[in-house]
Image: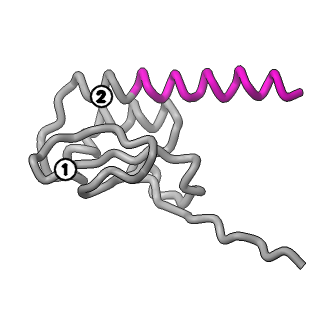
Amino acid sequence: MVKKRKVPMRKSIVSNQMFPKNKLLRIAKNKEGIILLDPTGKAPGRGAYIALDLAEVRKARGKKIIDRVLAMTVEETFYDELEAYVEHVLARRELFREDDE
């Protein structure tokens, strides 16, 4: 009998809902205070997770949630980069989902 693997769950900082880790994007703040997107989930530093959903990204930008969670001022360019990355990931998932059907 094959054992089922436990799916790691993480909480989105915007919606406070638990999601499987692969449905979230990690945002990391390193020791130098630089914030970066961490799609691998392995970058060193303090991490926060956000769902791969444009509505959550826009809400995080409007309410400055990432600033609050990571205790620093986040540049608008980072939010632009985050939104572009989420759009890209969602477009890829949609593209490959259509190919599988």
Lateral position of residue 40 relative to residue 34, left or right: right
Q: Secondary structure at mark 1?
A: loop
**Number of numbered discs overlaid on the protein picture:** 2
Residue at the outermost left position: 32
The nearer-to-camera label among 2 and 1 is: 1
Q: Main structural element of the magenta stretch: helix, strand or loop?
A: helix
Q: Position of residue 3 (x, y in %)?
A: 79, 76
Q: Look at the picture and state if 83 lies above or below 51.
A: above
> Does the CB distance between marks 2 and 1 fall below 8 Å?
no
**Badge 1 is on which residue?**
30
Q: Quadrant of residue 5?
A: bottom right
Asked if residue 95 lies in the magenta stretch, the reply is yes
Lateral position of residue 62 relative to residue 26, left or right: left
Residue at the outermost front position: 1
| Dot 1 amino acid type | Asn
Q: Residue at x 34, y 53 (%)?
A: 48
Q: Position of residue 97 (x, y in %)?
A: 77, 28
Q: Quadrant of residue 47?
A: bottom left
**Which is nearer the eye, 22 or 19?**
22
Q: Look at the picture and state if 91 lies above or below 82.
A: above
Q: Residue at x 55, y 63 (%)?
A: 9
* Image mark for residue 90: none
Q: Which residues are magenta?
A: 83-101
Q: Look at the picture and state if 88 lies above or below 38.
A: above
Q: Position of residue 60 (x, y in %)?
A: 34, 39
Asked if residue 29 lies in the magenta stretch, the reply is no
**Badge 2 is on which residue?**
79
Disc with the residue nearer the chain's start (2 vs 1):
1
Q: Quadrant of residue 64?
A: top left
What's the image's color scheme? one colour
